[in-house]
Image (cartoon, helix red, strand yellow):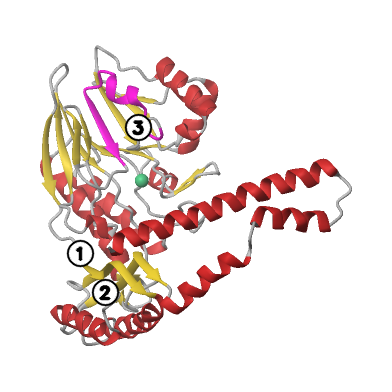
Amino acid sequence: MVKLLHFSDTHVSHRRFRDVKDSWKIHNRVTWIEEDYCQGFKEALEIAAKIDCDYLVHSGDLFDIPVGRNFSGPTEYSRAFVIRELKNFFEKTNYEKLLIIIDGNHGTYLTRNNSTLEFIQAAFPDNVHIFTNYHLKDAIRKNTPLILEMEDVNFYLFPYLKFGRLETWYEEYEKWLVNNQQPDSSKISIAVAHGMDRGMDLHELVLQYKYDYVALGHDHNQRRIKKNAWQCGSTAKYTFAERDQKKGVLEVQIKKGEDPTITPHLIKKTRRMKQIDMTLNTDLTVVEFEKKLKEKMSEFKAVFNGENATRLKFSFDGSILLSNWWNMEDILIELQKDGLGDNYNLLEFRWDSGDVKKRAPISLEKSAQLYDYLIEDPVEDFERYIRSLSLENEKQAMQFIDLGAKIIEEVFTYTAKEEESEKEETS
Ligand SMILES: [Mn+2]
C-alpha cells in the first residue's frame, strides 16, 4: 500500500495591488493577502507530517507568478517561506519523504525553459522531483515518457499544456500520450495532471487509462471526478467565486487493483471573502444607492485587524441610467476610501458592474434614433463614398464596397434586434 498527500494550487506569492488596503503584515516585507497563501502551503505540509504519508504530490500552481505576460518571479519572502517550511518538514520526517511537483499554468515562464520549481529541486535534490513545462515539451518532441519510477510505484506526469489550442498540437500530444504514458499493470500507477477542461488541457485518456489514482489540479474547487480521480482544490480562497468553498488537501491510500481510499483534510484558517449582490433599477436614486451600500457595510464597522479582516466585493446587476451610474461610481470610490480606512475591518473593497445594463438618458436615445433616419440607404451611401476616392483598382473598390455593405448590414440588424429585446424586457 502507498499513502499520498495530494495538494495543489497553493498559489504562493499571490499579491493584489488594486482595491486592497495599504497595510503590511510585516512592514515593508509581506502583505496580509500574500501571507494567506503562504499559510495554506504551510498547513498542507503540517497535515502531510501528521498523516505520515509516503509521498507528497503537488499537482501544479505552487507559485502564483509568473503567469501569462506577467514575467515577475515570486517574492523573496515567499521563496524563503517555501524553502524554510519544506526544510522543517523534511527534518521532522528524517528526509524519508519524497515530494513530486508538476508545473501548472502559474509560476512558470511558459515561453521559456525556466520554472520557479527549479530552486526548490536544487535545495532538496534527494527529496524533490520536479516536472516542468519544458520537460513535457522535450518529451513530446523526442517521443519519450515523462515518468518517475520508484520501486513500488510509477508516477505519470502531465504538467500544464493547452494542447487543444491547435489541432496539430492535439494530435502530437495524443500520440505521445498513447506511446509513452500508459499505466504499468504490475505496479501502482499514479497520474499527476494540471488541467480541467477535457480535450483542451486535460486529455480524456488520462481519465480512461487504468491508473490507480489520478491527482488533478487547476480546478480550485475540491471534487471527485471519478472513483480514482480527484481535483483536490486550492489551499486558500483565490477568487470571490470560491468564497463559500471549503479548502483542503487529500489523503489517498492506494492498493494495487483496488479503488483508492480518499480522506479529505480541511485547511482550518482561511480568509473570509464576502460578496454582496445588488440588483439596480432605473428608479433607484443616487441617494438611496449610497444609503443601501452604507447599510450593507455597517456589518464590517470595527477596528482593522489584518488577522481576520474580510475581503469584500459588491456585485451589481439590473439596469441603470448612465448619468446616475457616473454619480454612483463616484460614491463607490468614496465608500472604498472609507472602507479601507481605519473604521472598517476590511482588507479589500471592490465592485463589479459588468452585468449592469447602463442605459443612455431618454433624450439621448431619441436623438440616436433620429440619426438613423438621416441616412436613407447606408450601403448606397458608402458606395458613393468609395467611388469618390477614385480608386484605380476596380477589384479592390468592389471588395471595399462588399465588405462595407456586410458591416453595415450587421450593425443595423444588430441595433434593430437590440431595441426589440429591450422593449420586451421593459414591457
Ligand atoms: Mn492553474
In the image, farthest residue toward the right: 392
Instruction: Look at the image and tell me in which quarter the N terminus lies.
Output: top left
Please report whichever mark, 1 or 3, sits nearer to the chain's N-terminal start: 3
Splitting the image into 4 quarters, where does residue 2 fall? top left
Residue 189 belongs to magenta span: no
Q: Is residue 229 above or below residue 271?
A: above
Q: What is the secondary structure assignment of the residue under circle 1?
A: loop
Q: Residue at x 30, y 84 (%)?
A: 286
Q: Residue at x 39, y 70 (%)?
A: 358
Q: Check disc 1: other Cα within 10 Å, few if <14, some if 14-19, many if 20+.
A: many
Closer to the camera, 31 or 364? 364
Q: Residue at x 23, y 76 (%)?
A: 346
Would you say 126 lies left or right of 418 here? left
The tally of labels here is: 3
Q: Do labels 2 and 1 touch, CB within 8 Å?
A: yes
Disc ID at residue 342 = none
Disc ID at residue 271 = 1
Q: Of tags 3 and 2, which is closer to the observer?
A: 3
